[in-house]
Image (spheres, rainbow, N blue to C red):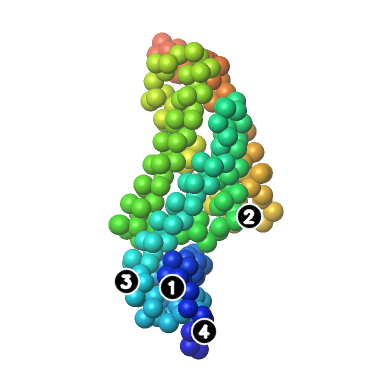
Amino acid sequence: MGAVKSKRMPRAVREQQMLDAAVRTFGQRGYRAASMDEIAELAGVSKPLVYLYLNSKEDLFTACIRREAKALTEAVRAGVRTGLPADRQLWDGLQAFFTHTAENPDGWTVLHLQARTHGEPFAAEVAAMREELVAFVTELIAVAAREAHRNPSLPEGEVAGLAEALVGAAESLAAWANATAGVTAREAAATLMNFAWAGLGNLMDGHPWSPPAEADAVAARAVT
C-alpha cells in the first residue's frame, strides 16, 4: 500500500508527525525489526521524504530518543512545585514521572529498552537523560536535607547514591507498571514513596541509619 498523500504542512509539523510514527513503530516492533517503509506508511508520507528529513534509520532513532528524553525530563521538572515540603516535592516528581511513562508507553520502551540494548551512540543519549534526572533528584534531596538540618555543608555524596538508587527503582517500576494491568501512575508513585521515604525522611530529620561498628559485627559473627 502506498503512503497516504496529505496536504503540504510546515517542516517542523511534518517532522513531528514522522517522529510520532517512528516512536510508535520502534516501541512496538523494536529497532531492528522496524522498517522505514512502515514508519513512512504510518506517518502518511513517502519513504524518500523520511530520508530527506531525517537522513537514515539511525538518525531517526536518535531523534526519537532525544525527543522522548526531553519530554520526560521536562515533565518531571514541571511536576515538582518548589516551596513545598521535601516529601511533597518528591511525590509530585514521582507522579509526574509515572504519569508520563504510562501515557507514553512506546516512548518509554524506546528509552528504557530499545536505546539501551543497541549500543552506542543510542545508549549514550539515554545515559545523558538519566544523568540529568539523577542530578535533579540529588539536588532536590540535598537542598531539602540541608534545610532540615540547617547544615549547608551536608555532603552531596550522602544523597547522590540515594538519588541514583531512586531513579533506578523508578525506571524498573515504570517498566513493571506499564506491563501490569490495572497499575495506575498514582499507585506506582505511592509504592516507591513507601519504599524510599522511610529512609529519606530519617535523613531529612538528621537520623540516618548507620552500619554496626566493626566490633559489633565481629561479635555477631562469633555468636553465629
Q: Is mark 3 on a helix, strand or loop?
A: loop
- Give the percent coordinates (x, y) of residue 84: 60, 28
* Tag shown at residue 4: 4
Residue beneath the point at 42% across and 16% down: 152
Residue on which disc 2 sits: 180
Q: What element carries label 2?
A: loop
Structural crowding at the residue carrying mark 4, measured as other residues with C-alpha within 10 Å and reported as few (<14), some (14–19) or many (≥20): few
Count of labels shown? 4
Residue on which disc 3 sits: 55
Q: Residue furthest top?
A: 215
Residue beneath the point at 43% across and 38% down: 134
Residue on which disc 1 sits: 34
Q: Which residue lies furthest to the left in this view?
A: 120
Q: Is mark 4 on a helix, strand or loop?
A: loop
Query: Which mark is first along the chain, 2 or 1?
Result: 1
Q: Is residue 205 left or right of residue 216?
A: right
Instruction: Kindly report which numbered mark, 4 or 2, lies closer to the viewer in this rendering.
Output: 4
Residue beneath the point at 39% across and 24% down: 156
